[in-house]
Structures are given as structure tokens and as C-alpha cells.
Image (cartoon, coloured by chain):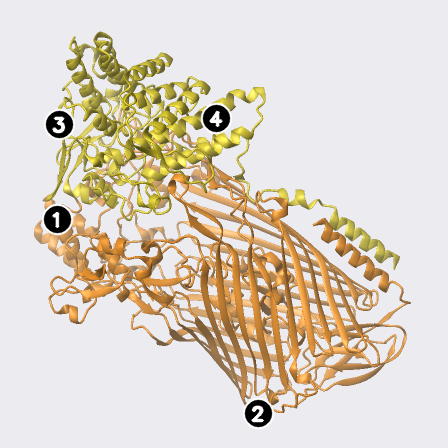
Chain colours: A orange, B yellow
Amino acid sequence: MKKILLIIGIYLIIFTQLHAQGVETRSITGTVLVENDESPLPGAMVKLKNSVVWAIADDNGEFEVMVEGGTYQLEVSFLGYLTQSIEIAVPQSSPLVILMQEDELSLEAVEVVSTGYQQLPKERATGSFVFVDNELVDRRVSTNILERIEDVASGVIFNRDTYSGSDPISIRGRSTIFAESKPLIVIDNFPYDGPIENINPNDVENITILRDAAAASIWGARAGNGVIVITTKKGRFGSEPQVSLNSNITFGEKPDLWYYPNMGFDDLISVEKMLFDRGFYNSQLNAAARPPLSPVVETLVAEREGRISPEESSARLLAFSNQDSRSDLSDHFYRTTVNRQLALNISGGGNTHRYTFSAGYDKNDATIVGNGRQRISLNTQNHWSLLRNRLEVSLGMYYTNSYTESGTEVPTPYPYERLVDENGNPTTITQGYSRRYIESIAGQGLLDWSYIPLEEIGLNSNLSSQNDIRVNTTLGYNIANGLKAEVLYQYWANSSSNKNHRPEGSYYARNQVNRFTQRNADGSLFLAIPEGGILDLGMANMYSHSLRGQLTHSKDWNTKHNISSLAGFEMKDLQSEGNSTRYYGYNDDLGISLPVDHTTRFRLYHNNSLSSIGAGAGHTGVTDRFVSMYFNTAYTYDKKYVLSTSIRKDASNIFGVETNMRGVPLWSTGFAWIVSRENFYHSGWLPYLKLRATYGYNGNVDKSLSSYTTAIYAISSSHDVPPGIRRAIIINPPNPELRWEKIGVFNLALDFETKNSTLSGSVEFYTKNGTDLIGDMRIPPSAGMTQFRGNYANTKTNGVDLNLNSHNLKGKLNWNTNFLLSFVDEKVTSYQIESNTREYLGPILSPKIGMPLFSIYSLPTAGLDPDNGNPLGYLDGEISTAYSQIIAGTTPDELIYHGSGRPVVFGALRNSFDWKGLNLSFNISYRLGYYYRRPSVNYFELLNGRITHNDFEMRWQNPGDELHTQIPSMPQGSDTNRNYFYQFSSVLVEKGDHIRLQDIRLSYTLDRRKFARLPFQRAEIYSYANNIGILWKASDDQLDPDFQSMRALRSIAFGVRVDF
Amino acid sequence: MKNIKYFLIKLLIVLTLPGCEEFLDSKPSKDLVVPVNLMDLSALLDNSSVMNVSPSISLISSDDVFTTESGWLGFRQDWERDAYLWRKEVYEGVTFVPDWSLPYMQVFYANIVLEQLEKINTKPSEQELYNRVMGSALFYRANAFFELSQLYTPFYSWNDKTEGMGIPLKLDADINNWEKRASLQETYDQIASDIKAAAELLPDKPVFPNRPSKQAAYALLARMFLASEEYVQAELYADLSLQINSELIDYSYLASASTMPVPQYVYPIPFDNPEVIYFQQLANDSFHSSELVFVDSTLYNSYHERDLRKQLFFYENFSLGGANFQGSYTGTFMKFSGLAINELYLISAESKARLNKIPEAMSMLNSLLVTRYETSDYMEYMTNSQEEALQIILIERRKELLFRGTNRWSDLRRLNRDPRFAVTLERSIGDKNATLIPGDSRYVLPIPEVELDYNDLEQNP
């Protein structure tokens, strides 16, 4: 570590010496704008004629060239624009404004991508970047910024399978198994540690996605999953104050509770009746836990015990079969949602100062009545250019405050249980205990123990609030021509609190009081938990300091050579602390609570078991530290060849790892060749052609592992003996060989553009080799653990990303098409555990060599038995119904491998039409080449008296049915192996391929340039409809392959954006 | 220009100075530790949900319990149903077998502690704590090996040095080192030497009942020697243990305690009662909490009407099929499997009878049983015949120690060798009948597949 510091020090000193000899310098400053709409032209090259001095216009089109006094000839050039020549006398009287005219002959798309460390014209990049510009960022209407890149960035997929909780977004597949699998998110140069929900999309200027080693390796050990770089809006020098207002309202659909198909209630009731007659419920009738039984079973019990007549009983059962709890849930607990969004942005700048100020307000309804969220964001960003542009200072402050209310909990009634009676009055439903038991103890002096869901709405409050502050400062000094020193510092703090109040009278509070009610020997009652509400409080404070010092250097010589370098040092310290506590007998009006005894083990009233009163105390503390060094350089020859290298070393406080094992040096190198600039190149139809190739390593971290034995402290629970003492649990056996994961990435790409930009785009091929990945190894239990995690796995991913833009029509009617296609083929190439058949079937992630990480397997089936409708499987090649032997005897290799559980081919097709200010665009997304297991009738559930899938109605019932159904008959008794066999049989695996009309956007823009009398510069009225529906799917399963429990809810937004 | 140089040099100093090593040495989460000091090691052994739990398969397989068909069907796990009918394929397809894995996890914890203790230089003021932690680790390891030996190895006679396969004796914490099966004799010698070493180190009595003590070590030795028919040492260690404390609960004080809103599930004997030497309970499997699991009816009927245990131990649930057991020394439905003073009285009494010290044996038994009756109700047992004394003691042993861990299963394995006490067990569920004759190979459970899949051990016949 110190060596690297030393090297950087030497680098610093050498360059300081080199450039310290200059005489007094002055600067030429100015802004490069596009002529027709005066938008900035970042990346434009500003050059002194007959000199090696040059500069590149930044994000805002601004540039600065260091010169001595005198008169100069400036040349401003940019691909796709006519080169301009301007004469200027230094010192200049005012900053230049250069308007660039489009070159009709060469319209090459030029973008400036950001790595979080530097801005880079895409033309000079060797790595794989996806740039999402402001127009695309603003295309969608959403509260969350990440949703804005869905289906518009190639190689990026939003996962929707059962494992997607750990990696909701993947960039070019997943190159880890158990370690961190989310991409790194960088906002304004620093990784963002807070919840992404705190970022207001209206403040975002653009997003760059870094996909390969050359692009991402500057982020070193955190780049393994790709990097998403978000850049917020900045003001511009020399521009009038600009006020922009965006307001929209989104209407969302109510959840469709009938989406998941359930069997008919009369069938369910007859099954319950059969189970009852068989004595299935007998063991539960008086069981210790007083388990709740369904209203049907309670009716049958009442009939058997003679409490109601057989007629009454059948009348009740008939009534049950005709009522549906979903109607009541839908009427009383769910709603259509309204989301409101308002955003204001003011920006501008003078000669030496530019600024932006923005404010946003979002108010979103949850689909559950009473719940919702609001967010206020306030940002300000200032940038000063001082000492004749030698010193640059910027200060940004970003504040977000949000509130989330989730006090309403949706009850889980039995399918035919009503929440209201015939007159619409709220009624009691079964909850927690048998209704018979609750009735039997009436009059014993307890609090009312009934649960009336409708009366709970609005009673409980579970409020989370959050304050998030980010302060971002930059200090840059142009030491001499081409050499710049920068210090960047960011302070981030997030404090959140959660207040969950269940007041006196709420079911939760009453239930706790009753459970802990003690009966004294004389029959009197003692309330171990006093009457009153229960208040849970949680607080968490997090903060981080990030500091970066870097030098950038750029040098040209002999007009053909350019070298740009960047070297720096970075440190980060993130700390968080959380505490939680619980109060009993709480009264919110008075603000007081009552003490309880947390150490005594009380007998619970309903079952005599012993338990102490939960204290709800918890404390957490996390420290996350990184120290990194990086160096990055690019050499360009004759604007045709670019050679880039990057190296970075990270070290972190991964627990227990020897200091010298902590760090991992990661490097990359790349080459680009702009073929179309060669003299021999004369293609008229393809005026731009660039070839790129990169190779290098990215890293990944699993902070949960350690090379030493690691233990975690906990307090023994109230059920343990003795309760409430400190104990330590081993979470990690020693592993002295632990290393960080390394992902080697090779990327080969071609960028092209045809004449007049009719067709442009890129195609990229890549290979990712994940080595030393964290994987499990099974060990015999006699060794002390059943499995063990270490660097045991390797994976390999091959893929293609294609991005095509075409201008189909130009003129009055503009028609553009954007087509994205990604192909990902990932395979596990080395893994230590040969899992057993059950594990490969799921649901636990069980990697298998030669197969995709997420694979769908099934048990081979031979239809149904014509005599009894039993599902038939194979045992040693023979048709069999010996299910336990089939499951145990089928080897993993005999399982049917269907394919990947995640899309292998995916992408989107976006069409956009412009006509006289009217814009219509729609995005069609597709996901192909993957499989999923569809739900079907589950006889284990059903024969335990629980409702199941409506495949029940299509089951085998009579001989001959096997010709037209694959759904087995209902077995006599619950047979877990038969049920397991069917749930994991090949008949339930479906192809997930589908095409979806994701969204439509329609807008109309009014522009002062066309309507001179408008009171504003520009206004856009827009409407956006999302989750419109599936156009085609391969499977005839009625459920959406990507949304099996609840379909994606449709929404429509209306809004207006005005630039004054 | 000078200013810049100054700034850069300063920047360099600022960047180099904070020692990276210290900065990166801070631990990532407050609750994480690398267990190195005695407090951490003690806390590892205090993890009672690992260290104080024992395999429960021996109880469901023993003749203390019976269930009805619906009770049997209501068991949550297949292996519970199979174990009830003594099926050989009990562990087939079971990926996690606590009966096997849990004791070895205890061994792992103990070995981690023992290896770390070797690296600690103790201050004189900490010597006592050091000894307790080391003694505890040895005790836990021996206890785990003993529990395993009762399930997975054939019967071992200490004096005959019975030949046969023991268990893998894992004595280090290296999880990459996989042991093969030791011989039976090596297994028992290891158990005995570990406990004896522990007894030297441990304090007489523990602060918390989950922690081992000298008294517990002696009691465990007594239990082990009884199970291997070494009655001289069984008597010796039972009496040594009783010398430390021999207090019994007077059940007549417990009898009037039930004032619960519901008479069922009262579990009147709390875990912190004076008879408990070392607390341990059976792993929580679904049959423990089933109200359709009853005490064997012959056993239930063998209690005298005035025997206080009959009311305290059982909840008469005859409408459902029998009497539920609620007399566990845990105070809950969980079954006690630790060491208690009443067991020592019975070990001592039996050993004495075996060694033909009949009067001492009967006196030992009577002093236990008098606390199980209202004093005025108790009629002392009197006999001079060794055979009769043994008969009485073994019946009373069963009545006192029912539903207690591996005791009954161990007794069956031992007593079945003697035709006078051998029993054939029979069970039926619906049309499925099962019989377990004395010496049946199913008295030795198969080594689970999850072990054999990775460690090439010889399977039991």
C-alpha cells in the first residue's frame, strides 16, 4: 500500500516539476453549442492552430485552453459537425460562444460517457459503455431512477425469477454465485450507499452503464457485477436562469386477487368434509397450541357435538361455498393508486459561476388502503471557476426526506370467510387460535380476543422516516497546460427511524396482553403485560466519508500523439449504527409507557408454555472501509488508434483476512481502431467504423466470509435454558485460503454508422471467466459442519449485445427505431458439490458443472395410470409409482434438463414517431430461451385442508381421463412423495418465452421557436402507459411467466413539463 | 507555483499518513468476533441451542411411547414415522440428520475451544476460568461421543472389551480432516478419558444449569459405565457425584401447584429444580408436542394410585387414546435428557444390587422413592434376594426415568442381553406391524447417507 502511495507521489512530483517552468499563463474559455437548439456539445475538440494545445468541451460544452497572451487561431471540431475556425485575442473580453453547424454529410452520434472518475468522449473509448441520455431517462414516468434503464440499455436485465431478490438487476448475466450480485451504483463520482429510492429521477441528467473490464476496472474490486453511473444535472456558464417544471400524475390498477387461479370453494369444502370424517382434524381439536381451524371444520365440529342441527350445518356450508373473501379484501383493503410527482429545476450561470437548484415532491399511494410514501428532495449545486479558470471549486448538497406508512396489514382469512356480514358490518375472522377456544374462555376476564380486520384499518401506524444528506465538493487546480490536480470529497449521512405503534384496542396489543395474562392461585388475574398499546422503535444512523485525490494529465506532441492519464488515491469509511427497542402499555396521547418484567418466564394463557416477554432490543454496528489506488492511461495515435490501460488495487477491512491478502490488484487493457479514418478506407455508405477489443479483470467481494473462525454474539431466547445470557454462535469455520473473486472479461466490439446515420449501432461479443468464485463445498457432518463456503467455483459466460438505431423516415414525419438484443450463455465450469436430485430440483440454488447457474430440471414422467390416475415415473427404466424410490433413485444426470431459468435472449424494440411536435413511442420487450415451473394442484396442501390451484378441476377422475389431462387424481391420503413427484415432474415445466408491449408514450411539444407568443420556451404535455400486456407467449399457462403470483399492474400517467 | 508544490506535498503526507493497516483492521460488524479470549470461548460453549441438545430418535424408538394411527400420520417428518416402526431405511433421502450432525457440531465447537485454549497464555487470575472452559469442552465432546455411541454402535461391554466398530473420533477442528470409524474400545476409552480429564478441571457446581460441572462429569461417567455393564465404576462415580449434592425434590410440594386456566400441558417440574445437575434436552421434533403421543399403557398402569408421579407426570387424555407425559425436567413439552440426581440414585442402587450389596441398594432406592409419595403413604421396599432387588430397581428405574433422553434405549440394548430382563417390542399402525426382538440389528442405527456420500465409512450391518 505504501509503495503505491510512493509511486503516486513520484508521479505527482515529476509532473509538477515538468510543468512548473511555465511563464505566466492565461486562458481561453468558452462554450460550444449546437446551432439549432443551443444545447451544449460535450466532447468537442478545441485546438490552437499549429500548436499541440487543445481541450475537450465538458458536459456543459465548456472548455478552457491555457495560453500565453497574444492572438490565436482556434479550431473547433466535432464528429458530425462542420469544423469552425475563430480568431481570438488573449486576454479575452468575454467567454466565447461557438455555435456548431451540423454536417449533413457526417452525422455520427457522439456521446460523452462517464466512468465516475472521468468524462470520456465515446469515440475515444475502448471499453463497453451504454449511454442513456436525458431524453431516454425522462421517457418513463417513475419514482425510482433505476426503472428508467429497464428495456433501454442492452445487456441489462431486470430479473423476475424466484432468485431475483438478491440481484434484481444483472448486467451481462451473473458472474458470482453467493457473493454480492448487485451492480455498483455510482452517483456523481462516488458509490451511493443509501437506498436508491432516495434519488429523484428528475434530478438526473444521464446514466452510463459500464459493462466490460476496460470500462469498469477503474472500480476494481467492486466492479464485478458492472457499474451504473448516474450523473445529476448541472448549470451552465453564461446562461440565463432557466426554470423548468415537471408535474405528473399516475393512476395505477388495483391488484387482481383473482389472478392466481384457485379451485372452487365447493370442492374445497367437500375435501375438508372428507378430511373431517376421516378424523384428520381430531389431533388438532384440543392441541396445545389451540390451532385455528377453518369455519367449515368448526361447523362440522359443532354439528358432531350436537351444538347445531345437521340442517343448520348444511345451510352454513352452502353459504360458505357462495362467499369469497377476495371480494371483501378487494373492496376494503385494496385500491387503485394515484402517484403524484412535482419537480422544479432552476439553473443558470455567469462567467465564473454556474448553479442549479432543484426541488421535488413525490406522493405515492400503496395498493393497500392507508399505506403510502412521500418524498421531498432538495438539491443545490454550485460551481465556481476562479483565478482565471485555474481553480475550480464545486459544492453540491442533496437532501432527501421520505416517509413511508405501512400500518395497514392485509388479513389472511380462509378463502370463504367474510370480512363483513350481510349488512356490511365488520365481522370477526379466525386468527391465531381456534374460534372454539376463544369462545370457551369468554367471561374469564380477558380482553376481547376477537380479530376484526376492518376495524384495524387506520388503527395501527408503522411509519418509517428517513433523512438523507449528501455533500459533494470538488477542488480542482489546473497546474499547467494539461496537468490538473483534483481533490474530491463526499460526506453522506442517512438517519432513519421506524415507529410501529399498535395502540390499545388493536388486535396485536390485545393478543399480547391476553397471552401473558397470568391466573393467580385464588383465580384472580395478573396482567404481565399491562393494558395499553405496544410501541416498537427502531433507529439507524449511517454516514460515510469518501476522499479522492487525483491527478489528470494530457499531452499532445507532433500533432499525432496524445496521452491522457489519471492517477489517484481513494479512501472510504462507512459507519452505521442501529438500535431498536419496544415499549408496552404505551399511550400515545400521554406519551407514557409502563414497565414489564423481561426476565421471568410466564406461562402463556392459552397453552401453559413458558415464555418471557420480548424486549425488542437490538443493536447493530457496521464499518465498511476501503483504501484504493488507481492509474489509468490512454494513448491515441493520429485519432485512429487508442490504447488504454487501467490498474487498481483495493484493500478493505474484510474481517480477519491477513493484511497482505486483503488487497487484490485488478487491471485491464484495451485497444480501439477507427477504421474509417484510415486513408485506404473509402466506403461511402459506411462512413464510420470502429473496432474495439479489451481484456482485464474485475473483482467481487463477499464480506460475510473470513479466513479465521468467526462467531457472532447473541442473547439466548426466552425458550432457551437459561434465557437471556450471552452466547456466541460460530458462523464461519476457519478458511486460511480465502481470496477475492476475480472475473476476467474479454470484449470485442464493432461500432458503425451508415451514410446519413440511417443505421448506426454497435455489436459486442464478450466472454467472462469467473474464477475463485465463492461456492459451497459439502463436507461430511462428522467434520463438524454440513457444508463449507470458500473459493471453490468457476463460471464462464459468453454473450452478445447488439444495439441498432435506425432513422427510417426523415422530414416532416420522423420515424426512429431502436433495437436491443442481448444473448447470455452462462455456465458453471467448476463446482465442488455434486448435489442430490432434490437439491437440483430446487428451490435452493444448486450449481451444476456444465449447466447455467439457474437451471430448470424435472423428473421424467410417463403420463397417468389409466386405472387410478396416479402420475407415472421411471424407476431403473421401468414405469413405476414407487415415488420415494423414484425420487431417491433418479440420479441428477437422469433428470430432464429443460434449460436456463433466466432469459438467454432478451431485448427490446422501441419505435418513435415525430410529427409536428407530436411524439409517439412504444417499447416492446422480449425474453426468450428460458423455462419456469408453473404452479398446479398441490395435494399436500389440499389434504391438509388448504386451498390449491384450480388444476384440481381438470384432474383425472375416471379411466379415460388420462387421454386428455396430465393432472393426477386426488390421492386417498396425503402422500408427500407423490405430491413432490408431480410438483417437480416434467409436465409442469413451461417455456417462459414471451413478447410484451411494455409501454406507450405520447407527447406534444410546444416550442417558442415555432409559436413566438408562448409565455415559455418549451412545454411538453405527455402521457405514459406502462405494463400494457403480453403480445405473445410460448406457454399456454394462464399466468404471466414473469409474474406468477400477481400480474404486473397497469398504470397510466399524465404530465406536463414546462421550460420557462 | 510554490503554493501548489506545498499543497501537493501536504496532500501526499495526508494520504500516506493514516496507517492503512490500522484503518483496515476495524471489524465490519459490531456483533462479529474472532473467538480468541476466554470470554468468547465460554460464550461459544454457552450456545445451549447447539451444546445442550441431544438426538431424539432413541425416544420415539423406545417402548416408553406409543401413538395412534392419526398421531403417526400427523408426525411432520418421514423419519419420525419410520423410526416409530424401526424401519432400516429411516435416513434415506434425509439431507439433514440432526441425530448424527448435532453431536458432531458439539464436537466441532468443543474442538475449536480446545485448540484455541492451547494458544492462550493464562494469567493466574484467569486460571479458574481457563480450567472451567477446558473442562466444559472436554465434557461436551465426551457427552456427544457417548450419545452417538448409543445410537450408531453395537453394545459395548467394558470388561469384555467387545470388538466392533465405534464412531469417527474427531479430535481436531480442521473441517477438511475427515475421520474413519474407530473401534468400540477406542470410542469408550476416549469418552472415559475425556470425562475424567474434565472432572479434574471443572468446579463442583455450575453457575447456570447448562454448564458442565464436576458433579455432572461424575454423573456422566456413572451413566457411561452403567451402559457398558461396568458396575464397580458406575457405583463409584454415582456415589462421588452424590457426595457433591444429593438433594431430591419432595414431590408432595409440587402436587398442589396446578392452578392453571387449563389443566392440560401444565409441565409442573421446572428446569431450575434442585435435582438437575446438567441441563440438556432432546432436539425438538414434531412428536414431542403431539397430543396423540402417549405413555406406554402398561407403564402407566404400573404406578401406584398414591404415587404422586401418577398425577404429576401424566395428563389423562383417554378420550384420545392414553395419557400424555408432562413430567419432563424442562418445565415444557421438550424432553429432558440431561443429568439429574434421581438418575444417580438409580444407577447407584442398581450397581450395588449387581455387586450384591443388597441392603445398601434397597436403602438407596427407598430414599429416592419416599420423595415420590406423601411420606405417610410410602411403604419401603425390603428384600434380600439379588434377583428380586434387581427386578424392583429396574421397574422403578423405568418409572422414574421415562421419556428421559437415550436412557430407555440404552437400557433396552443392555438389559436385552440378560434373558431375565429381555423384552420384545411390538408396534402396529393400521395394517403395518413391526417387531423388535432382543439383539436385533436395528438396535444399531445406520450411518446416515449424508455422511457416507462424502466420507467413506463402513456401514452398520
Horizontally, residue A482 falls left or right of residue B417, namely right
Q: Read off the chain for label 2.
A: A
Task: For the N terminus of chain B, give its image quadrant.
Answer: bottom right
Of the pair B398 and A72, the residue shown nearer to us: B398
Q: Amino acid at mark 2?
A: Gly
- The amino acid type of the residue labelled 3 equals Thr
Protein chain holding label 1: A
Percent position (x, y) of residue A11?
A: 78, 59
Image quadrant holding the C terminus of chain B, namely top left
Q: Which residue is mark 1?
A: A278
Is B322 placed above or below A454 here?
above
State the SS at label 4. Answer: helix
Q: How far is disc 1 from disc 4 in space, using C-alphas?
A: 55 Å
* Neighbours of disc 2 within 10 Å: few (<14), some (14-19), many (20+): few
Q: Is residue A36 left or right of residue B415?
A: right
Judging by the rendered image, the residue that carries numbered circle 3 is B298
User: Label 2 vs label 1: CA separation?
Assistant: 78 Å
Mark closer to the observer (2, 1): 1
Disc sitting over residue B133 in the figure: 4
Q: Are marks 1 and 4 in contact (CB under 8 Å)?
A: no
Depth check, mark 2 against mark 3: the one in front is 3
Task: Determine the secondary structure under disc 2.
Answer: loop
Discs 1, 3: same chain: no
State which mark lies toward you, 4 or 3. Answer: 4
Q: Which mark, residue A776?
A: none
Q: Amino acid at mark 1?
A: Arg
Please provide percent x and percent y for residue A804. Answer: 53, 81
